[in-house]
Image (spheres, grey):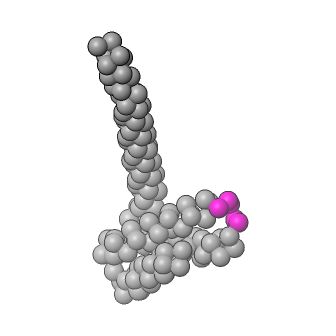
């Protein structure tokens, strides 16, 4: 968790410095991506343990929310019209795509597990039937 916090803080520092130097967010898009990706990772980690269960994670997420509010204000006042709403819709689409990829990955893992299970069944049955057939044939001969 500390590594993610360090990445988010570093990314926000780059963003804030670029904005202070008069650059646009387009110029530091990789830092913006790192910031929001890290925020998503921290949220997932915090919610795995239960909402607000880890005080440090909660406080760090609050700091990230304050940083995000700063970015929102910049997008609203210094960006092009509807930049913030376009950003929110982009985030929503990216989230849906990540969820679809996770679902596909889980479905693929389930399919592989089923194939392995059926392979084990087939092997077990083959190991039981083949000796039995040989035993019956040897008794009959």
Q: Nearer the viewer, residue 17 or 99?
A: 99
Q: Nearer the viewer, residue 57 or 36?
A: 57
Q: Is residue 83 left or right of residue 59?
A: left
Which residue is pictured at 55% across the width and 61% down the height?
Answer: 44
Task: Indicate whether 110 appears above or below 90.
Answer: above
Specify the quadrant of the image occupied by residue 62.
bottom right
Residue 3 magenta = no
- Counting from the top left corner in percent of width and height, residue 86 is at 41, 56
Is residue 37 visible in the rendered image? The answer is yes
- Counting from the top left corner in percent of width and height, residue 67 is at 54, 75
Specify the quadrant of the image occupied by residue 16.
bottom left
Task: Indicate whether 103 appears above or below 98.
Answer: above
Q: Nearer the viewer, residue 56 or 107?
A: 107
Which residue is pictured at 62% across the width and 72% down the height?
Answer: 57
Q: Is residue 139 left or right of residue 3?
A: left
Which residue is pictured at 44% across the width and 66% down the height?
Answer: 37
- Counting from the top left corner in percent of width and height, residue 94 is at 40, 53
Task: Indicate whether 28 appears above or below 90.
Answer: below
Q: How many marks?
A: 0
Which residue is pictured at 38% across the width and 65% down the height?
Answer: 80
Characterize the magenta stretch by its predominant secondary structure.
loop
The residue furthest top is 140
Segment colored magenta: 49-53
Q: Is residue 111 left or right of residue 64?
A: left
Specify the quadrant of the image occupied by residue 114.
top left
The C terminus lies in which quarter of the figure? top left
Is residue 12 visible in the rendered image? The answer is no
Q: Nearer the viewer, residue 129 or 111?
A: 129
The N terminus lies in which quarter of the figure? bottom right
Residue 52 magenta = yes
- Counting from the top left corner in percent of width and height, residue 32 is at 40, 71
């Amino acid at each position: 968790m500390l590594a993610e916090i360090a990445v988010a803080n570093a990314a926000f520092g780059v963003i804030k410095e670029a904005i202070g130097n008069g650059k646009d967010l387009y110029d530091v898009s990789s830092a913006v991506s790192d910031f929001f990706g890290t925020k998503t990772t921290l949220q997932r980690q915090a919610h795995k343990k239960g909402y607000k269960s880890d005080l440090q994670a909660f406080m760090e997420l609050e700091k990230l929310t304050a940083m995000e509010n700063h970015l929102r204000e910049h997008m609203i006042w210094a960006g092009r019209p509807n930049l913030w709403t376009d950003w929110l819709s982009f985030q929503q689409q990216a989230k849906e795509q990540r969820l679809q990829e996770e679902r596909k990955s889980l479905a693929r893992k389930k399919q592989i597990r089923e194939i392995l299970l059926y392979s084990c069944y087939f092997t077990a049955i083959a190991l039981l039937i083949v000796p039995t057939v040989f035993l019956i044939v040897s008794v009959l001969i």
